[in-house]
Image (tube, helix red, strand yellow):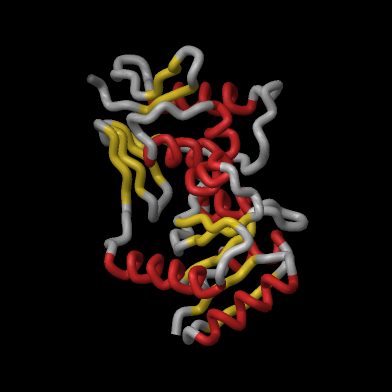
Amino acid sequence: MPKILAIEDDATTGKEIVAELEQHGFVVEWTPDGRDGLTLALSGDFDAVILDRLLPRMDGLAIVTEMRGANVDIPVLMISALSDVDERIRGLRAGGDDYMTKPFASEELAARLEVLLRRRQAAPRQLNLSVADLDLDLISRTAHRGGAEIRLMPTEYKLLEFMMRNSGQILTRTMIFEAIWGYHFDPGTNLIDVHLGRLRRKIDRPGLAPLIHTVRGSGYALNAPG
């Protein structure tokens, strides 16, 4: 029986999720706390996570970002009272597989979860990412370009993985900030510039065709040479 982790701080909603999923044959563990939820999500004991967007002690975006950064690739169904399109996009781009807006029908939540689990069983696990001569091993969490190993700090790895998963797309500073650091973008911070600068010096060494590009007025992109 699939084992599901539900991270939801509202007791009524949490109990409804547990009751509905148990009727469908799932084993469910529920926690109302964000930090406790992250610890459980990283344990490797669960087949999928139902994740509230707004949680005490740790935000849902931060949780899914930490999960993906730690290479925990189980399905994540995000739920939230935040219904605008930008919020849904943030949740999906941070690593969520589906997004439901509260209030929702418990039967639909169970059905969507079943779809995510079937999709995971059918799809082969992705082991690496490649753009041109740049390769990222998602198991060993190592990067190589032209056969030479690139030593990455944890945040640089997360940033490179995010950019490679979205290669060919323009990534705004807001998208990068919220996907990597998991909270609302502060236009006054230079975190992105600092980490992208370090990553660019490691990836685009002298003599190599540049892969990381600044798109003036829009953001950044990682592209194979044209």
Residue displayed at 42% across by 35% down: 163
The N terminus: image quadrant: bottom left
**Number of numbered discs present?**
0
- The residue located at (58%, 65%) in the rendering is 104
Q: Quick check: 210 above or below 26?
A: above
Give the x, y percent position of residue 159: 49, 37
Q: Position of residue 98 (x, y in %)?
A: 47, 56
Residue 154 shows in this picture: no
Q: Indicate left or right for 87 with 225 as reference.
A: right
Residue pictured at 40% horizontal, 19% vertical: 213
Of residues 72 and 31, the one drawn nearer to the viewer in this rendering? 31
> Residue 32, how many percent across, how many down?
72, 68
Is residue 131 or residue 82 the one in the foreground?
A: 82
Q: Is residue 29 left or right of residue 126?
A: right
Quarter holding residue 37: bottom right
1 up-or-down from 219: above or below:
below
Residue 10 visible: yes
| Residue sitting at x 60%, y 48% | 83
Furthest residue in direction top, as rendered: 216
Give x and y (percent) for residue 188.
Answer: 70, 21
Out of 84 and 191, give the one closest to the viewer. 84
Asked which quadrant contains residue 150, the reply is top left
Q: Foreground residue, 181 or 20? A: 20
Task: Name the image quarter holding the C terminus.
Answer: top left
Can you tell which quarter of the image residue 212 is in? Answer: top left
